[in-house]
Image (tube, rainbow, N blue to C red):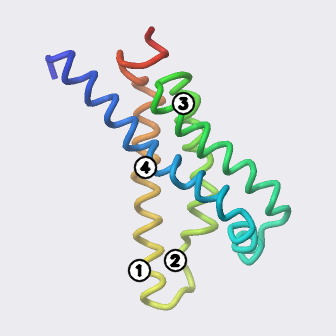
Amino acid sequence: MNNPTLTNFAALVGRSLLALLFIVSGFGKITGFAATAGYMTSKGMPFAEVLLVGAIVVELLGGLLLVAGFKARWAALAIFLFLIPTTLIFHNPAGLAAQAAQDQTIHFMKNLSIMGGMLMVVIFGPGAWSLDRK
């Protein structure tokens, strides 16, 4: 693309769309803390409450930093790394009934796609319309 305004706008919108899922999810984990901790425990996670606080920090802080474009590469890397165990633990379709496996496969693939977007931010940066560039 040779239009810097369009490129910068696309980078801002792309970062914001990537971040939206994590901001909403982090807020949902706060408002449903006990239920989320219970679900994590049912998946065999030890220290669910402590890990849940960590997930909230990564999702909310990482998402907000990504939108603002402040330390965006680090935020994207943190979210990318967070998605590895999240995807493997919570969206592994192996051994599930057909419909549940199909649902989890969709979530698994969605997370892989998001990881690709995060890697793009890590490598190419947040764009000119970001606090990192100011």
Q: Of the residues shown, which amino acid type is indicated by label 4?
A: Ile
Q: Do labels 1 and 2 touch, CB within 8 Å? A: yes
**Looking at the rendering, which quadrant does residue 121 occupy?**
top left
Q: CA distance from mark 1 to mark 2?
A: 7 Å
**Looking at the rendering, which quadrant does residue 130 occupy?**
top left
User: Which residue is identified by label 4?
Assistant: 114
Q: CA distance from mark 4 to mark 1?
A: 18 Å
Extreme residue toward the front, this view? 31
Q: Residue at x 85, y 61 (%)?
A: 47
Q: Nearer the viewer, mark 4 or mark 3?
A: 3
**First of labels 3, 2 by sequence position:** 3
Q: Of the residues shown, which amino acid type is indicated by label 2?
A: Pro
Instruction: For mark 1, give the secondary structure.
Output: helix
The percent coordinates of residue 52 (x first, y second) are 73, 56
**First of labels 4, 3 by sequence position:** 3
Instruction: For mark 2, give the secondary structure.
Output: loop
Q: Do labels 4 and 1 touch, CB within 8 Å? A: no
Locate the N terminus by quadrant: top left
Locate the C terminus by quadrant: top left
Extreme residue toward the top, this view? 134
User: Which residue is identified by label 2?
Assistant: 93
User: Which residue is identified by label 3?
Assistant: 65
Q: CA distance from mark 3 to mark 1?
A: 33 Å
**First of labels 2, 4 by sequence position:** 2
Q: Mark 2, residues whose alpha carbon is within 10 Å: few (<14), some, or many (≥20)? A: many
Q: Residue at x 41, y 80 (%)?
A: 102
User: Which residue is identified by label 1?
Assistant: 102
